Image (tube, coloured by chain):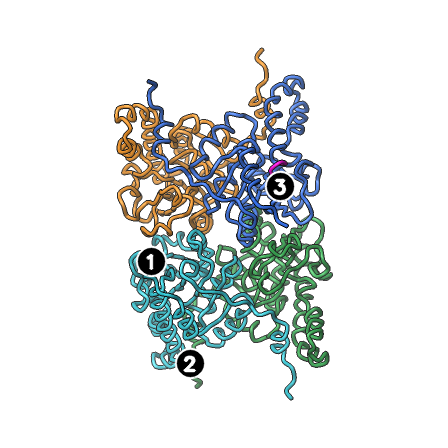
Chain colours: A green, B cyan, C orange, D blue
């Protein structure tokens, strides 16, 4: 028999994080940074511009590219289902209020990440394009809660639980997930509707977050949950 | 020649997160959950109580135990150096304000983690025992910023940068690190003064955070930085 | 017929702020700064120490003293009724975490208002002494929400409405009232369970807040509302 | 000799709130709700629509109208001077993110105050029209800090002090002033660049706030302070 691993001890001790209902008026879908600037294209272009060999760069990101576009498709499926069932939708995006660098949060200003307002790079990807009257919350930092009034908006809507999708797992998504669960939201993170450059980092974070402060499900599992909700008239 | 990996592309593109000064009056050392409840002992006891074989449990956590106590020792060294140089110190601890479960944050209440006030398990480990007039900030959730007035206190002290040590890398430390950098603090995370159960999770998070939203250093590197500061009279 | 006054125009236009239910598990009583430092005694002592004539000082504060102690008695009555009905109680008090002035908020530090921890002046007045397991939230600034984790605690308890009593109407009470209603709480301010030095300032604020962002009631009216709640077994 | 009044005792005891420097890069001018919806016109129109006699309504608001437009002119003068000296400017305005009532904060939703996005009523008055690249922060509640990311933006700009102008003294301005000083900003409130319906309420609040948690100055005094700042090249 194989020896006990620390994971086994953790699993044995853990009170699993309890499941919760998804319901219109109580749940919101939060789409995080599903926009041009997060997609692999500008990443490849920048690398080539820096002098890295195009062929090798493209080879290096093949796996990430696949996971990224799969996550976009999955996010789009969940978005469609949420809209059909009357689940509220919030599009969180990187976009500065002005082009003045001082109006971008220090954390991104320091690494030169200023996302010019109304620029192409801050547009939502076409797969998840906001409808009129869907909320758009702009941010200039990582976590969707720490630099915006997202929490204020959600609690004034009486939202209690969140479905999180988007990018990158170990940056904005992780920051948002930790914060959301910490302030009392029931959080559902969709494993294959999020991704990051290195898959090891993605997997490690999913492992850490799951059943510690939130529930992790696949897109298929979430779609099944959404399917059970009665459609609004 | 080995093919380019995605890490190489990221490294080539990255504007590294800039370094910053550590200085008395500007920097605070934040010790996160370095307390009995976070130590391996109660973990082992609980596992044995659950019926897991003692010998195997102990074997399974040998590596974690080593990393945990090393991180405690390193935190104690940094604490000593910070005190000597007049760097402000804040002890953040899991401790409920009362034993009423409703007074513990939902995120921990849901998994049954109620840390009784003034109990043995909420005491700081002896290696990092607070001195009189050092700040103690209690929390009942994960991140040190989202459920406390820590940010309020620090900004009223004009603190601009933080040294983070403590436990667990992928839970309270990560939540605190993402949040701190997001709201504008310069953050230094001490790689070997923090740990978590699975070392892969520790390493993955350090990799993700480093140069994305904060600086990662070793205890030795931090001690060298502290050493250069002129001692107060 | 008397000419129309601007008040009449406002009243005619106003959609009155709607009433709301008070209920155990949903409502919390917030006692603000009902502690020795807020009482008239230290005020008189300080004035005499400054060289003001004792007799005149005492005459000058007669009216305030009467209103203050009436408000304390009214707060005590409401507290008793809330406890009997299982309404949650939070005691908010001025008290610094340490005697280091830097650990007091700038707003009070600037005017020299450092309330030494565990000192006599930060104790609750005997009329409203906290019971074991009642929440005590310390602050070093004015508003009970801006410098504490009070909002975090209340929302994790699923509290939706607040009864506010305490001191001073135009300082900590007003700051707390504006903030509470702004972040979404239903707020009931008890007119004669709060007071401030100048009665004109008290009356003006009550006028401004009433039906703009909260409901104002008298102690008797609140007691009647509490009386209708079924007692817990 | 006249007897001592409680005001005299307060003045004698008070450590006056200390003065502070106004400086580009450190100070921001915050214009609060200087927009069509706050002006007397819609107020008069609504009153007439409700059936109040036009002549009497107009007479009733004559005094308010005068004070309102004086405050707008004064705000415009201060804005012009701030721009000339390189002082940062933030326009805070009532404007909902969408026309869905749930996206307006409860506090205003309850009294039916939904300010339709991009409508005429949410435009800044022409006297204080924002320039391109000046920050605009929308809110759907009262205080400019509690329902927005204004604090986040200002601290990421290293702003330490605020000049407050706008409307109404005893609603959004008071809520903003209490909150700003409570979280550590040095606050300068411009007495005659703000107003509210009833002048007694205006005067009472100015009296309460002055030297308790902020400094009150007249427009002329502020212009003199601004005049002394060296113009940027």
- Magenta residues? D76-80
Structural crowding at the residue carrying mark 1, measured as other residues with C-alpha within 10 Å and reported as few (<14), some (14–19) or many (≥20) = some
Question: Do we see residue C233 in this rendering?
Answer: no
According to the picture, the residue beneath numbered tag 2 turns out to be: A4
Residue for point 31% across, 69% down:
B127
In the image: residue A54, left or right of residue C54 = right
Nearer to us in this view, B51 or D135:
D135
Let me know if residue D79 is in the magenta part.
yes
Residue A128: mark in rendering: none
Nearer to us in this view, D76 or A40:
D76
Residue B134: mark in rendering: 1
In the image: residue D116, left or right of residue C193 = right
Q: Are marks 2 and 1 in contact (CB under 8 Å)?
A: no
| Label 2 – label 1 distance at C-alpha | 41 Å
Nearer to us in this view, A75 or A64:
A64
Residue B34 location, x and y as percent?
Answer: 36, 66
Circle 3 — which element? strand
């Amino acid at each position: 028999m194989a020896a006990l691993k620390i994971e086994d001890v953790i699993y044995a001790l853990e009170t699993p994080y309890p499941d919760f209902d998804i319901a219109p008026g109580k749940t919101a879908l939060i789409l995080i940074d599903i926009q041009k600037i997060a997609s692999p294209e500008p990443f490849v272009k920048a690398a080539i511009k820096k002098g890295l060999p195009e062929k090798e760069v493209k080879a290096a990101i093949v796996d990430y590219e696949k996971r990224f576009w799969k996550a976009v498709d999955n996010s789009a499926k969940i978005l469609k289902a949420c809209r059909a069932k009357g689940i509220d939708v919030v599009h969180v995006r990187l976009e500065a209020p002005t082009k003045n660098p001082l109006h971008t949060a220090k954390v991104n200003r320091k690494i030169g990440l200023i996302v010019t307002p109304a620029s192409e790079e801050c547009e939502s990807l076409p797969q998840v394009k906001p409808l009129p009257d869907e909320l758009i919350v702009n941010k200039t930092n990582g976590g969707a809660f720490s630099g915006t009034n997202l929490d204020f908006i959600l609690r004034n809507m009486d939202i209690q639980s969140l479905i999180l999708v988007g990018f990158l797992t170990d940056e904005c998504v992780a920051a948002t997930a930790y914060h959301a669960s910490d302030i009392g939201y029931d959080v559902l993170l969709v494993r294959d509707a999020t991704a990051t450059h290195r898959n090891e980092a993605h997997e490690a974070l999913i492992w850490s977050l799951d059943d510690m402060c939130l529930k992790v499900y696949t897109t298929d599992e979430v779609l099944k949950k959404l399917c059970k909700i009665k459609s609004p008239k």
